[in-house]
């Protein structure tokens, strides 16, 4: 069996790749970084170091790499002959790889190779749906050659220490939930996957607890002058703010999906424990990067805050987290630099900051969340 995975970075190798390896797949990693592709084509193995409770090392073999930009013909052939296609490239990159996937699916259909499972393993709700739409725009008959299935993924993969090569250090915990309905009762045999009838509760709970909590810790920690995520949660003030944020998202999740309050609280506490794992030297700069994406309409702060506001519930903690995101000032991060520049240009002009509210968060003046956001933006 062969799996083609777009994105040969730490998440690709240390999460999706290792689970597919353990399921018996030969791995082909597609990426545009030629030095990384060269390493994948010369090294015989790499090791995934799972740290924390029940730590273990997993030796991954049977892999290769293809430069998806420089060798489109080889990429098309890999898609044509793959048993599964997965991605971990970031939600905004999916539309960029869609044409290549479309060409591979076109080749599959022409050769009679049958349908291939396509799953976008991204931190976004229904990311595969977005990828499928972009693929169909290029190849309208894509569903004749592919089964598109949405996923929810969860594993902390921090920045890696220099000199590790292809090796990756990750937490022991992982969750990879995939909707089973598109497969018509015959799902691929991947022991690391949890097949579910309805993905919405899983993916929304993960996004509005894990991603919301992680980013809130980063932004409140940054504001407190703390560099490590684990240290940020040791600060009583930061921890209290993060807990308040997750209390608000808990209310939404309990009402929307019927989670028992005590079950959701246990999930929150488990997540906070994962963030304090001393073996994962994660930083607020890494977790907080790309703040403009993180405060966009369907993302981890505005998404739950908008629904809560629509239902008449308080959103003070989530709005405070958005305010902390607006103060995230890391010049090395392109979105942070752009955000700070435009906020500085708009400072003192309420109409200008209000324009940024709608542009960045997708919330207009008629929405009940608009006024709290307007206040937060005016103070940024």
Image (cartoon, rainbow, N blue to C red):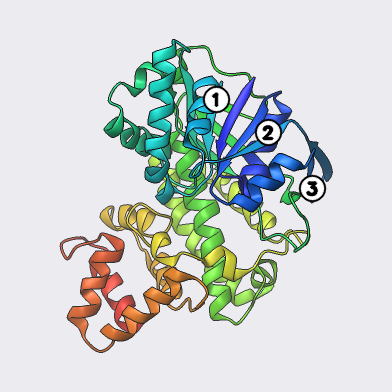
Query: Residue at 70% of width from left, 34% of height from top?
Result: 63
Query: Residue at 48% of width from left, 79% of height from top?
Result: 329
Residue 376 or 268: which is nearer the viewer?
376
Which residue does the numbered mark 2 point to in the structure image?
19
Q: CA distance from mark 2 to mark 3?
A: 13 Å
Q: Quadrant of the C terminus?
A: bottom left
With respect to residue 127, does 148 lie above or below? above
Query: Residue at 26% of width from left, 69% of height from top?
Result: 357
Query: Residue at 67% of width from left, 43% of height from top?
Result: 13
Which residue does the numbered mark 3 point to in the structure image?
49
Q: Earlier in the sequence, mark 2 or mark 3?
A: 2
Number of other residues with Cα within 10 Å of mark 3, as a class: few under 14, some 14 to 19, many 20 or more: some
| Residue 173 seen from this side | no
Label 1: which secondary element: strand
Q: Quadrant of the N terminus?
A: top right
Residue 351 or 232: which is nearer the viewer?
351
137 vs 99, left or right, is: left
In front of the other: label 1 or label 2?
1
Label 3: which secondary element: strand
237 vs 333, left or right, is: right
Q: How far across and how far down the image is residue 162, in percent?
A: 75, 64
Number of other residues with Cα within 10 Å of mark 2, as a class: few under 14, some 14 to 19, many 20 or more: many
Q: How far across and how far down the image is residue 159, in percent?
A: 67, 61
Q: CA distance from mark 1 to mark 2?
A: 13 Å
Which residue does the numbered mark 1 point to in the structure image?
84
């Amino acid at each position: 069996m062969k799996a083609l995975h777009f994105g040969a970075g730490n998440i690709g190798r240390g999460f999706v790749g290792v689970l597919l390896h353990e399921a018996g797949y030969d791995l082909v990693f597609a990426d545009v970084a030629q030095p990384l592709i060269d390493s994948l084509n010369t090294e015989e193995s790499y090791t995934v170091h799972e740290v924390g409770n029940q730590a273990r090392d997993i030796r991954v073999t049977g892999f290769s790499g293809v430069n998806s930009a420089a060798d489109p013909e080889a990429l098309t052939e890999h898609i044509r002959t793959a048993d599964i296609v997965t991605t971990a490239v970031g939600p905004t990159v999916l539309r960029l790889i869609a044409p290549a996937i479309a060409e591979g699916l076109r080749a599959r259909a022409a050769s009679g190779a049958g349908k291939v499972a396509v799953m976008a393993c991204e931190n976004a709700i229904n990311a595969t749906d977005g990828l499928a739409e972009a693929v169909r725009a290029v190849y309208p008959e894509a569903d004749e050659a592919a089964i598109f299935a949405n996923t929810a993924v969860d594993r902390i993969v921090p920045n890696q220490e220099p000199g590790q090569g292809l090796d990756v250090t990750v937490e022991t915990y992982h969750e990879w939930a995939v909707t089973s309905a598109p497969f018509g009762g015959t799902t691929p045999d991947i022991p690391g996957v949890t097949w579910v009838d309805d993905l919405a509760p899983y993916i929304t709970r993960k996004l509005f607890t894990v991603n919301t909590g992680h980013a809130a810790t980063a932004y409140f920690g940054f504001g407190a002058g703390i560099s490590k995520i684990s240290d940020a949660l040791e600060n009583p003030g930061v921890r209290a703010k993060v807990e308040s944020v997750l209390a608000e998202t808990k209310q939404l999740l309990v009402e929307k999906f019927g989670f028992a309050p005590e079950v959701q609280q246990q999930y929150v506490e488990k997540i906070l424990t994962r963030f304090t794992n001393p073996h994962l030297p994660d930083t607020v700069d890494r977790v907080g990067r790309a703040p403009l994406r993180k405060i966009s309409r369907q993302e981890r702060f505005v998404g739950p805050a908008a629904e809560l506001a629509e239902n008449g519930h308080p959103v003070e903690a989530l709005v405070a987290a958005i305010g902390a995101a607006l103060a995230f000032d890391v010049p090395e991060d392109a979105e942070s630099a752009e955000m700070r520049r435009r906020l500085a240009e708009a400072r003192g002009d309420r109409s200008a900051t209000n324009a940024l509210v709608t542009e960045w968060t997708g919330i207009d003046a008629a929405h009940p969340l608009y006024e709290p956001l307007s206040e937060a933006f005016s103070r940024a």
